Image: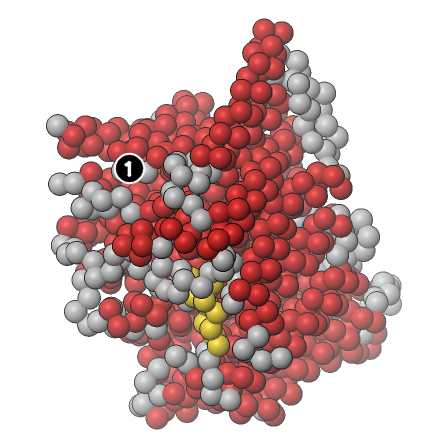
Amino acid sequence: MTLAFDLLLALSLLWTAWRTLATPRLDRALVLFIVFGLLMSLAWARLAAPDIGLAEAAIGAGLTGALLLDAYGVLRRRVRP
Amino acid sequence: MSTGFVFALAGAVLFSLGVAGVVLIGHLLRRILAFNLMGSGAFLVLVGLAQRQDVADPVPQAMVLTGIVVAVAATALALALVRKLHALTGQLGLPGDVDE
Amino acid sequence: MSMSEPLFDPLAWLILLPLAWATLAFVLGPGRGAWPAIAGLATQCWLALDLAQKVGAGGTAAHVVGGWGAPLGIDLAVDGLSAAMLLLTQAVALPLAIYARSYFKPGDPAGTWFWPLTGFLIAGLNALFVSADLFNLYVTLELVGLAAVGLVAAGGGAQQVAAALRYLFATLVGSGAYLLGVALIYGAYGTVSIATLLPLVTDDAPRLAWIAGGLMVAGLMLKTALFPFHFWLPPAHGGAPAPVSALLSALVVKASFYLILRLWLGPLQAVLPAFAWLMALLGAAAIFWGSWQAIRAVKLKRLIAYSTVAQLGYLFLIFPLLAAPGAIHAGVMQVFAHGLAKAGMFAAAGVLIKATGQDTVAGLAGAVERLPVTMFAFGLAGMTLMGLPPSSGFLAKWQIIEAALAQGHWIIAAVVLAGGLLAAVYVLRVLRQAFLMAPASATLAPVPRTLEWSAFALAAASVLLGLRGVELMQLPGAVT
Amino acid sequence: MKRRVLVAFVLTLALAFVFLLAGAMLDLGPTTIDLRAPVAAHLAQSGVTHPVTAVLLNYRGYDTLLEIAVLLVALLALLAVVGDAPVPPSRAAHPVLQTLARLATPLMIVVAVYLLWAGAFRPGGAFQAGAVLAAAAVLLHLVGLQPGWSRPRLGLRIGLAAGFVLFLAVATGLLTQGSLLQYPPAAAGVLILLIESGLTVSLALILASLFLFLSREEGA
């Protein structure tokens, strides 16, 4: 049962990662990337590593996501002022 | 198969996907995403493989915490460079690269 | 001062001091911090010399950080090879710091954060050379890599920023591959301590150890810009401000080479030698390709950067020869020869560019007459790159040829000779242009004397080292 | 066409590498060395009871020291790249959002303090606490209550460096004990808490700076 959950989680990680790189729209890629970070947090919880889970959610998904979204917003505004 | 092993294998795939992304993708924001995927893959291998018997090991866990901070530092610097390049040239790719 | 006094352990202070003056320079503010840096580097030179003397006398030095000891804690260890690298780093950085103080005018955007970034770079290099822990080495690699990228990009235009981005991705993928290798090693052996791994990794190592070795070396090759991974180097080293190019070419690329050698002779010695001829092949390709591009280069600093690609090639020729002790000596001598000569040459190029206002070989006409000291420095550095006696470059190449012939690998000797001829072509191309009459219209901007003489000191040291090379070469005899 | 070939080539290579790696991982026997035992055995002398914190700040505290240096370097490099730029006028968000952010900030500070304190004996610590504080600053910026930063003035520079300086000073002072970062067991707990408190503030400032110095560049 837990193995099934782990496999499902691992597959969703890989699928999200693949879509992040392959999806044609950049905004969607960024959202997928943040989802990927949250899934990573779950994976860390499964690996009995709550410290990393916390850090991943706060720094990996949170801060990196905010940095990326901010950059995206600026770049888009510059393209059509 | 243990939890550790499942995520170590997933990490191996993620790492390869990330490297392929950095090599193949011309769009710089997308390349930064690929670099982060690569890093996450290496972190999963580090902890997952060490915990393949499903007993928590604090040493690789602490190493990954260090690695995550280094990765966000690198990401912020990369974004600063990309934004500067875009401000100067209006481009989001490097000259001479294969494009998407 | 003795090793029994832990408070004065030079090994620890070689890391603490640059961290301290880097932080001080940051707090002091934009453009500040030159004097703390120069004072710190002078002290570090003395510490490195002290350490080298101890190690040269047959000892080794170690520092057990935290008092735990490997594999639980992190150990620092210095043998002859690391002592030599430490010595080179401080010896190159000090004159370059004196150079950089005159090079960056107040308010120059490229110099805003030069001092703290350089301090962290030097601290990272020193920490890398003494670390005996594979994961700790990863952190030092990132410290060096990010500081180097920041120095390349500082205050630059579009081309420089693009070069920095290319460099950043190369260095990040390189350390990423290294990190995955470390992860696999930890998975296979349960430790990342070099000393602990040494007896564990044997000929019947699991397949994972081979993959780990391949990943780590591939990542480090990318960071060393070994052909065909050299694509990022010429724009980064050619586009950065002269003091930065000098630091990067002389020291930063050597750090990852050092780490390859460290792994090769140490924890992965059962695994890596299978790749010895591949390394030599790529090294030979680097010599020919880098020299050819240098011969064709239009820009002066681009020429020097391609020459770095070529000169790095020699370092990889030693891998099939490591059975003979002379090969290591040759490698260290080449690291020194190229480090000093290339730092001197980039520094001289910086003077020439400041004076002529353009970064081209063609613009050098008349330089010999107007800037004799700088052109003499360029010539001396060129002598070392060509491998003319009595320079240290000659000594290095002689040692490679000797080791190669002793083991019957005449092909390596032939590559070394051909490389020397090609180097002569691109060095003489610059000198010939400098000897031409200057066009009547050309005026040269005045250049501070300090710039000329610090470039000269570095270049002269690269030649004079050839006369005192034996002492230096005894150092890495003590590789443990 | 050429591009297609390249993509196919790289992806094939990546796939082959995955299979090679997976096969080798499956072959692996037990390791000779298991660090869990020494980590647990020395926990009583480490000054903390949470093993990950013990590794991060005591056994391998030197890694963490250099890692803070990496963060500072990234910030310095970022400042060197973006240079001086005027701060664009901040765009105020909807008043409801602003009120929410005002309410959330003290809550986040409490969470950060809890995380910092908890790190000694359960998951948490300076990094997570610093990240939460940085997130609070970013949140205030996004709703227009905290302008972007134009240049690091002396006070901010001191704040950014303070955590690292404190860590460095403790590491150096402990040389008297025999080596860098060699905590005397009796004082380890206090010293680690001191370092973590300093790091929390500086990490929060550094992480927030990575965001606030970048975001002002949009006027360029």
Image quadrant holding the C terminus of chain C, namely bottom left
Q: Residue furthest front?
A: D186
Q: Residue at x 40, y 84 (%)?
A: C327
Please give left or right for residue D122 compared with residue D143 in the image: left
Residue B21 in view in this figure:
no
Residue D122 visible in the displayed image: yes
The number of callouts visible is 1
Residue C376 position by quadrant: bottom right
Who's the residue at 41% across and 91% down the image? C402
State the residue at coordinates (47%, 42%): B69
The amino acid type found where label 1 is placed reads Ala
Q: Residue tagged by mark 1?
A: A48
Depth check: D130 or D36 in front? D36
Q: Is residue D78 placed above or below A18 in the rendered structure?
A: below
**Of the pair B59 and C435, the residue shown nearer to us:** B59
Across and down, in percent, residue D55 comes to: 40, 50
Q: Measured from the top left, where is residue C121 in percent x and y?
A: 59, 59
Q: For the N terminus of chain C, which image quadrant?
A: bottom right
